[in-house]
Image (cartoon, rainbow, N blue to C red):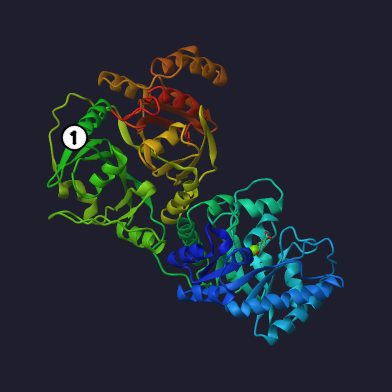
Amino acid sequence: MKTSIATVSLSGDLSDKLEAIAKAGFDGVEIFENDFLIFDESPREVGRMVRDLGMEITLFQPFRDFEGMPEPLRSRTFDRAERKFDLMQEMGTDLVLVCSNVSPAALGGLDRAAADFHDLGERAARRGLRVGYEALAWGRHIHDHRDAWEIVRRADHPNIGLILDSFHTLSRKIDVNSIRSIPKEKIFIIQLADAPLIDMDLLYWSRHFRNMPGEGDLPVLDFMKAVAATGYDGYLSLEIFNDQFRGGSASAIAVDGRRSLIYLGDQVKRQQPESALPVPAMPPRAKVEGIAFIEFTADEDEAAALEALFASLGFHKAARHKSKRVTVFRQGAINLVVNTERKGFASASYAVHGTSAYAAGLMVDDARAALQRAVALGAERFEQALDAGEIEMPAVRGVGGGVLYFLDRQSELGRIWEIEFDAIDDDSASRPAGLQSIDHMAQTMKYEELLTWLLFYTALVEAEKTPMVDIVDPSGIVRSQVVENVQGSLRITMNGAENRNTLAGRFIAETFGSGIQHLAFRTDDIFATAAALAANGFVPLAISPNYYDDLEARFGLEAEFAERLKANNILYDRDEAGEYFQLYSPTYGEGLFFEIVERRGYRGYGAANAIFRIAALRKHLRPAGLPRP
Ligand SMILES: O=C(O)c1ccc(O)c(O)c1
Ligand SMILES: [Mg+2]
């Protein structure tokens, strides 16, 4: 599959952009005129830079306000085109994108536009160049690819073709099936972009909010399936106008971009196996049975404190690693691993982030296939030296530089606890509290990283995103996005902090990076669990009594039931599907905390309760600015 991206999609100057694009593995690049105009090198030099990086220039763009001009503007427009043709020949590209005219001077009429394109095609042919016509969603006369295609068809010139851009077609909700009958050789290139659904002016939406296929809400896959049905096998080229991407890391955005195209191609190939799109073969998205373990890194003192907390939550010390300072705490299907090694990656993570949950293990259908897919999608493989008797566990780098491991039941990985660990008898007095499994894992990150990890997870494993919700923190907004599978066996909540004053923002600042901020454990009986926890000496996060008065009124709860919730500091939510109960621990260290939930049919995450939980958790933070104890 040939991949390309428009330089406008990334931050930096042209040479920074080109380097990031090449490094991410793209085959081609669209040179956006402004990126060239503000750059000091000659067109010839730009062409050389692109080719030295092993890429080609897929097209030069945009050429604006061309078709339908009255004289004398028409002649001037053709002169302007000749100047750009000179430039293209120096750069070494044969394709220019002409976007539909937005000028008030433009005259309508498909035949007039077709005649203009025929003439332009003659001029282009003399130089061996090609012209692709794209309908902008806000074009003055032409704003629908069906009209643009009709103009190209009537222009009837081999050097004139159509450029389809998913944003322009999908933002206007134009039926994508109209693409299927276009001859593939008349489609000169495909531009791709997604966008979140926001009700706003089309031009503004397009210029500021586009994102990578799969990151937004537009049916880009349907668009791409229609394109593939024509037999199209050329470049897929990203054109992403996005304010945040322009200010972000060019290399990170480029990696996301290439991942989005590979994932899109993969979906097309699976749903339309007969399509000609040359997509790299890779295993399907991994099926996740659950989160098999979470691994913490800590020093000896903090490990002891964590251990005491785990004991109060009803975990028992279950196994010790045969050769490493690694202990497993278990309850139900939950494995919490504490690593106090002084060498290796756990130790390096501790040095950077302090006590933290730096790794997670997913139980999947085929761990090695999951790794293969992750690598095909451009994920960074994680490997470290093994001791004798250790099993190699497939892994990639995840959020905040942490590690995401893959286990399965079909290989020895499913017996990791028996193979690498010795079972131990726990001598503590704590009793199980009915915690069954990890309901969800909450990862906190900067807002700019949300789309990256959303795409990472959804491209890699069988899981989908749910709509973004705003969480109100007394010090700002945190955006929350969920990735979950239909079975509910994988639930990841990602919180994107916009500033460092929110609880989430502080977590990132204090632990020097993104990571797992909390784990939610599932119980089948929240009240029995609360009683068992109390017997173990667990002190829950205290919730304001005012919350319970409001709750009683809001849901029409029985006074006795509301009183019971209040007595146990349990938060409550309800929707059409059922009821939800939440109980929290205070924060540990720099903002790490635990949650216990019971779901009675409910599928959400208690977003309405977040403000109460955050306000309560904040009381446990040490004042900002004080050094770590
Ligand atoms: O916003 C624009 O003007 C613009 C220009 C060129 C394109 O290919 C496009 O999709 C949009
Ligand atoms: Mg475009």
**Residue 85 appears at what percent x and percent y?**
67, 78
Q: Residue at x 22, y 25 (%)?
A: 431
Judged left or right of residue 312, residue 256 is right
Q: Vertically, is 588 above or below 244?
A: above
Q: Which residue is found at the position 38% from the left and 22% from the top?
A: 541
**Relative to 346, residue 87 above or below:** below
Residue 438 position by quadrant:
top left
According to the picture, the residue beneath numbered tag 1 turns out to be 300
- Is residue 241 or residue 178 the one in the foreground? 241
Locate residue 337, reporting x and y percent: 24, 40
Q: Residues within 10 Å of mark 1 (few under 14, many from 20)?
A: few
Towards the viewer: 52 or 467: 52
Name the image quarter holding the C terminus: top left
Q: Among all residues in the image, which is located at the extreme right?
A: 71
The amino acid type, in three-letter code, at marker 1 is: Glu
Relative to residue 321, is residue 13 drawn left or right? right
Q: Considering only vertical position in the picture, is 610 above or below 292? A: above
Q: Residue 43 location, x and y as percent?
A: 59, 74
Could you tell whether 358 is left or right of 317 in the image?
right
